[in-house]
Amino acid sequence: MREMKGTPARMVVGGKVAEFGAFDEPFREVNLLDVDLVMRGKHVPRFVREFRLKEWEHFGIVTDDYYFGMVIFDAKYMGTSFFYAYNRSTGEFFEHERTMVAGPLRVARELWHGECVFRSIGYLMEFENRLDSGLHRLRVDIKPRGGKPAVEAEIYVLEDLEKIEPLVIVSPVSENRPLYTHKTVAPVEGRVRIGDKEITLKPDRDVGLMDVQKTYYPYNTFWNWATFGGFDAEGRLLGMNACRNFISDDEEYNENCVWVDGKINLLSAARFEFEKCDVLAPWRIRCTGGDLDLGFTPRGERRGRVSLGVVMSDFHQPFGTFAGTMSGPTGAPVGVDGMFGLCEYHLARF
C-alpha cells in the first residue's frame, strides 16, 4: 500500500531528484531544471532541458448547468491555451483556442506564489496561484470571434490546505527523469459571463478540478486520464483522479486517488477500457486492487490535433458522467452516481 511521504524542501538536490513518490504537501521549490538529465548516455545541457520540459496548468469548473474547461500549456516549441463551455442541459458547446510559437506565455514555477499568463489578440487568460492564502485566482477575458460569444470570468478555486489534501506526485520516467503533478478537487466561487449571461459560482455547490504537470516526457508518449468532482446526495465533496501512462511501475508510482471531503486515499494502478476509434462510446476505469470500478458515459468531446512533421499531438477529452464505486480514505466503499467529469486519450510526439 502506498503511503504519503514528507515533502523535501527542494524537488532536486545536487542534480538528483530528492525522492520519488506521493507527498503530503505541495513543493515550495519545483526546481526541475536543476536535474542532471541523461539522454542516450549524454548529460543534457540546461537549454535543452528547458526545451524538453513540458508544463501546463489546467482547470475544470463543474456546476449543475455548465462545465468550463481551460488550460495554459507550454510545450516550448509552441504554446496553447483554450477555454470551452458545455451546457449540460442543452448540449450546446463552444470553444476559444489560441496557439503561438512565441509570445507572452508563462506557466507558474510553483503554486505557493506563481502566475500563469497567456495573452493574444482578443484573448487573455491568467492564473494566480496563492496557496499561502488557500486559493487560485483564474481570470479570463476573451472577445467574441467567429460567431462565438465573449467570455469574462473571475473564479477562485479554494484549495485551503487545512481542509484539502492535494495529490502531489513525483514519478520516475527513468532513473533521474521526473514526472511531477499536483492535482486537487476543491470548491469554487466567483462568476463567469458568457455573452450577456452571467453564471454565479457558489462554494457549497460548484467544484474546481485542478491539474498541474511538469515533466520531461519521452518523445513518443501517451496517457489515459479520468477525473471528476462534485457534491453527492449526502453533501460530501467527492473527487477522483486516475491515469495510466508510460511509467513502468505504476503500482508504486501513479496518480490515482479518491477524495472525500478533502481527505485523500491513494489507489492501485488504473486500467482503462474504451474504444480508441470512438471515444464517445462508454468507458470503464478500474484499479488493479479493486479499489475503483467506474463506468463513464460521454456527453461530448473537446479534441485537437497538431501534426508538424516530427511533432504530433492527437488529443481527445470527452466529458460526461461517472457511476460505480471507489474506496474512500477510511477504506469504506463510496458510491458514485452521475458525477460530472472528463476522460482523456492523448498520443504525442514532442
Image (cartoon, rainbow, N blue to C red):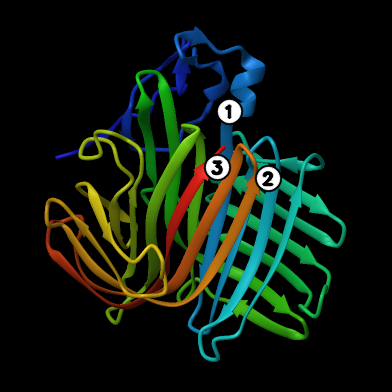
Look at the numbered disc 2 and give the secondary structure of its residue: strand
Element marked by disc 3? helix
Mark 3 vs mark 2, foreground winner is 2
Viewer-nearest of discs 1 and 3: 1
Query: Callout 1 environment at 10 Å: few (<14), some (14 to 19), or many (20+)?
Result: many
Residue marked by disc 2: 116
Counting from the top left corner in percent of width and height, residue 109 is at: 61, 34
Q: Residues within 10 Å of mark 3 (few under 14, many from 20)?
A: few
Q: Is residue 221 left or right of residue 307?
A: left
In the rendered view, tell whether residue 201 sits above or below residue 346: below
- Residue in the image at 14% along x and 66% along y: 333
Q: Amino acid at mark 2?
A: Cys
Q: Quadrant of the N terminus?
A: top left
Type of amino acid under label 3: Asp
Check residue 7 in the rendering and tell me which mark sits there, or answer none: none
Identify residue for label 1.
Answer: 52
Picture quadrant of residue 152: bottom right
- Disc number lying in front (2 or 1): 1
Between 99 and 67, the one nearer to me in the picture? 99
Determine which quarter of the picture holds residue 174.
Answer: top left
